[in-house]
Amino acid sequence: MTMLRLSDDQMRGFIRDGFLAIKTGLSAEANQNIWDKTEALFEREAVERRTWETELRWLETTTRAFG
């Protein structure tokens, strides 16, 4: 893997925008596959996060009940 240093403009853009667009040369199908897997991962994590939030609220309420 070749490592390239970002230019000052690229670094500023990354800090400002929070992402850096990279031309990988991958096919549209490969890019779609990556996108789909990333979306599925975010959805699974969102479900887990909702469960954790529910359990945390229960724990906080129960803790207050016992003083």
Image: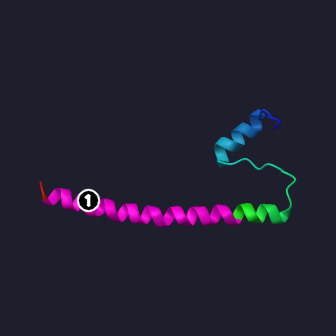
SS for callout 1: helix
State which quadrant residue 58 falls in.
bottom left
Q: Position of residue 6 (x, y in %)?
A: 77, 35
Q: Amino acid at mark 1?
A: Leu
Work out which quarter of the rendered image holds the N terminus and state it: top right
Q: Is residue 7 above or below residue 37?
A: above
Q: Position of residue 40 (x, y in %)?
A: 61, 66
Q: 42 left or right of 51?
A: right
Q: Residue at x 59, y 62 (%)?
A: 41
- Give the residue number, with chain letter if any, for mark 1: 59
Magenta segment includes 31:
no
State which quadrant residue 31 falls in.
bottom right
Q: Position of residue 30 (x, y in %)?
A: 80, 61
Neighbours of disc 1 within 10 Å: few (<14), some (14-19), many (20+): few
State which quadrant residue 15 falls in.
top right
Q: Residue at x 54, y 65 (%)?
A: 44
Label tally = 1
Q: Is residue 9 above or below residue 37?
A: above
Magenta segment includes 63:
yes
Q: Is residue 8 above or below residue 20?
A: above
Q: What coloring was used for the rendering?
A: rainbow
Work out which quarter of the rendered image holds the C terminus and state it: bottom left
Q: 59 left or right of 20?
A: left
What stretch of residues is rendered in magenta?
A: 36-65
Q: Position of residue 34 (x, y in %)?
A: 73, 60
Q: 45 left or right of 20?
A: left
**Is most of the magenta stretch helix, strand or loop?**
helix
- Most foreground residue, 57 or 44: 44
